[in-house]
Amino acid sequence: MEATKRNKTLILGCASTGAKFTPANHRETGDVLLDQISTGATIKNSAMALLAEANTLYGMGCRYYHYHARNPITREQSTNNEIYQQISRPLQHRCSEMILSFGASRNGPEVRESIQEYGEWERISQSSIPLHLGGAHYVTMQAAVELQLMCEAERLYGEMNLDVIDSEQFMKIVEDYQPSDRLTATSLETYSTSKGADYGRTSPLIQFEVYRSAIQARNQLRLFHEVEWVQFPRSYALTRYAVEHPQLRLGGSGQLNITLLFGFSPRLPFPKSYAEFKHVVDTARRLEYDLAEPGVQKRHVSIAVGAAVLPQQASEHVALLDVGARRGQPACALRRLATYAAQPDSGVDVLRFGMEDAPYAVNARAERQGEVRLTDNCELAETVLNEVAANGASIETDHDLIFERLGLNRVKQDFFHEQRRRPLGGIPATAA
């Protein structure tokens, strides 16, 4: 009997808190609703509230949970790893099949204070926490500030378009480029809150060393590699650089998850069409192959997508759907993202929603189309679930199939055993 072909399935992912929408990152405008959204007034901060919400999301089919630690009192970004652990440990117990991801693109006053006192490693120190001690399967190692490496490379070698990145010329750049130790104030060309793009003073060399240390930490812990793209094709250039560089070897374990945050910046705008969306997804998939051996798959690349659109830009992104069962109907950015991801040939594995990316709901009624209002992660989950179902796709909840989908099965057999034996990548605890 011929096997029945499965419809398109997606892993449902929540980006629960985020780094951008905090009180200190937003200058109040006097617009009460906009200020509430942009200061993260509706983002849950206490461990109790977050865990209760995560449990509800798990019941709705969510199997990927992305989390940025926030001080529960000030609601600002924090480098306190105990906050991460307070979420991870009970989540692993209550929602045992949830794939956990920690954010690393952290800024804000409390983050800057920690970095001033302890160094740049504070920004991504959560990458070295063992899973059973409150760590995560993934940590987004390609924090936005690390794009500083490619900004310097562009000044030295010229702008890097896709043709350059996929050429022998880029292989030469990887070989020749030496990150400088020049300290500069770092901000990003992003759509952001008033201070959300400020990452303090750092240098390309510092970022290179931090990136290398984070990759090494994940390898030692037998945990997995993940990056976020916020400036296409610059993000592609940095990931290609990290994959090819002999001292980095991002994805060297054979697996890499790439999260595409559409709408985060002018360089990665929210796509006007499904074709634009697919172009970025397909480009990310190229990283399964090295430039020197384009016909030999070296790693498995999985793709997560998010709609990172500011509330004041929400109405601009209401547009007619150009694919799917609701083609020709107007839809906000999040609904369009879900529709794109649900297409059979989308190439998407994880459909991400949440308060990190777009912490608001968009009114769909014709007379008030594009207006925003307060919401929470559970309502956003309902929104994407409705769009996925309308397009004939479904949500994957089978843990074994999710591990296979994300390329994790190759390490599943010895994952927990080795990670416990070598929690810091050193001599096994049983050796004496």
Image: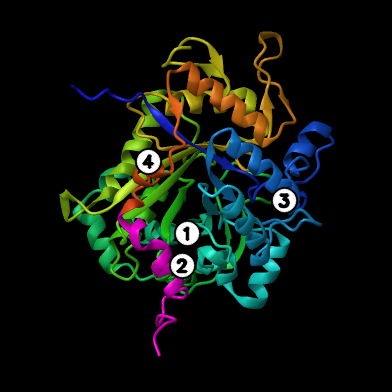
- The 10 Å Cα crowd at callout 2, few under 14, some 14 to 19, many 20 or more, is many
- Distance in Å between CA atoms under marks 4 and 3: 39 Å
Residue drawn at 41 percent across, 57 percent down = 225
Q: Position of residue 16 (x, y in %)?
A: 63, 44
Name the front one of labels 1 and 4. 4
- The 10 Å Cα crowd at callout 1, few under 14, some 14 to 19, many 20 or more, is many
Q: Amino acid at mark 3?
A: Asn
> Which callout, 1 or 4, points at the residue further toward the start of the chain?
1
- The 10 Å Cα crowd at callout 3, few under 14, some 14 to 19, many 20 or more, is many
Q: In screen coordinates, is 303 left or right of 331?
A: left
Q: Amino acid at mark 1?
A: Met
Where does label 2 land, which residue?
214
Name the front one of labels 2 and 4. 4
Tell whether label 3 touches label 1 (CB within 8 Å): no
Tell whether label 4 touches label 1 (CB within 8 Å): no
- Distance in Å between CA atoms under marks 3 and 2: 26 Å
Q: Which contiguous range is marked in magenta?
A: 410-432
Tell whether label 2 touches label 1 (CB within 8 Å): yes
Q: In screen coordinates, is 144 left or right of 73?
A: left
Residue drawn at 63 percent across, 77 percent down = 118
Q: Position of residue 140 (x, y in %)?
A: 49, 55
What mark, if any, has residue 25 been given in the picture?
Answer: 3
What mark, if any, has residue 141 been given in the picture?
Answer: 1
Q: Amino acid at mark 4?
A: Leu
Instruction: Kindly state the secondary structure of the residue where label 4 is placed.
Output: helix
> Which callout, 1 or 2, points at the residue further toward the start of the chain?
1
